[in-house]
Amino acid sequence: MANFKTFDSRFQRVMRTIIGIAFASISVGLAAAEEKVEPVELNDIRGMRYCEFLLIFDDRIDVYNTSDSAGCPEDLFKAIDVAKLAEAHGANKAQLNGPHFWAMDEQTLGMGGTKTFSGIEARYAASLPLSAIGAGTGSDPYKPYTAAKQQTMIFKAGNPVYELVDPDGNTYALNAYGAEVKDGDPANLANQLKPAEGWSFKVNTPSEDLTIEGSTDEPVQMVGDDFHQYYTRFGTAAQ
């Protein structure tokens, strides 16, 4: 898959909320009940570029992700007509989300069948309630929420982990970042973010592999920053 940065738009910052919600909501009792989902292992994905396609129906939003497909070619993605895309898939509307870049080294997540979106293949990732996009503003930055997240993330020893720390000392690891990150280096978020009072951003390089697991039986805590990039809580609060 291609590993490079490309265009971003004002809308993508708004829609970045879908990333956190999508992989936190692999099954919500909508179309997910009909879609066969299997665990997919993704290796060597730090910095890997991916995109998402949202199909909006009367009762749900179906999310498709390119992480386990043949990538998201910039020229094809930029040329997509969302009205035609929606019509082609029998949806009321369609929206594009991305491109984004994974911040971990490996992960296992649930994915389903493949669809083709104007020449780009993507696999089913989640079905969301219509309220997931609300007024299009995303979740409130620096306000943690609980997510039933079917996902295992691995950050390899010796590689940086980009973290938010809350006022109580709880630590959250960055899942993915957007094209507005300066020079494509999440370490620059130290100067780009404006954390809420009591919050801080830091870069940590673990000496051992860091594994963060979540499931529908054991929900995780997540939080977004002011760029609507999402982080998952791990470990115990610092004393």
Image (cartoon, rainbow, N blue to C red):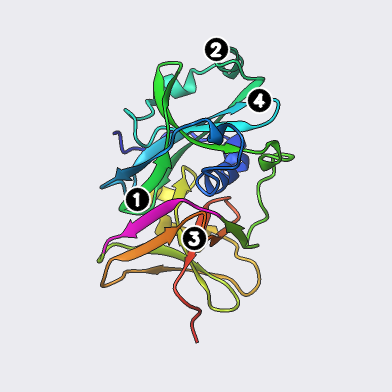
Give the residue pinned by disc 4: 57
Is residue 43 shown above or below 88?
A: below
Q: Nearer the viewer, mark 4 or mark 2?
A: 4
Residue 107 is tagged as 1
* Pointers 1 and 3 in contact (C-beta within 8 Å): no
- Quadrant housing residue 69: top left
How far apart marks 1 and 4 lie (CA) works out to 29 Å
Give the residue pinned by disc 2: 88
Task: Report if residue 152 lies within the magenta region.
Answer: yes
- Quadrant housing residue 18: top right
Residue nearest the viewer, comparing 168 with 24: 24
Which SS class for mark 3?
Answer: strand
Residue 172 in the image, given as x and y percentages of width and height: 49, 65
Name the residue type under label 2.
Answer: Ala
State which region is magenta.
148-156
Count residues near mark 3 (Cα–Cα under 10 Å), then give few for <14, some for 14-19, many for 20+. many
How far apart marks 4 and 2 lie (CA) works out to 13 Å
Name the residue type under label 1.
Answer: Gln
How far apart marks 3 and 4 lie (CA) works out to 29 Å
Q: Is residue 97 left or right of residue 205?
A: right
Name the residue type under label 3.
Answer: Thr
Is residue 16 shown above or below 155?
A: above
How far apart marks 1 and 3 lie (CA) works out to 13 Å
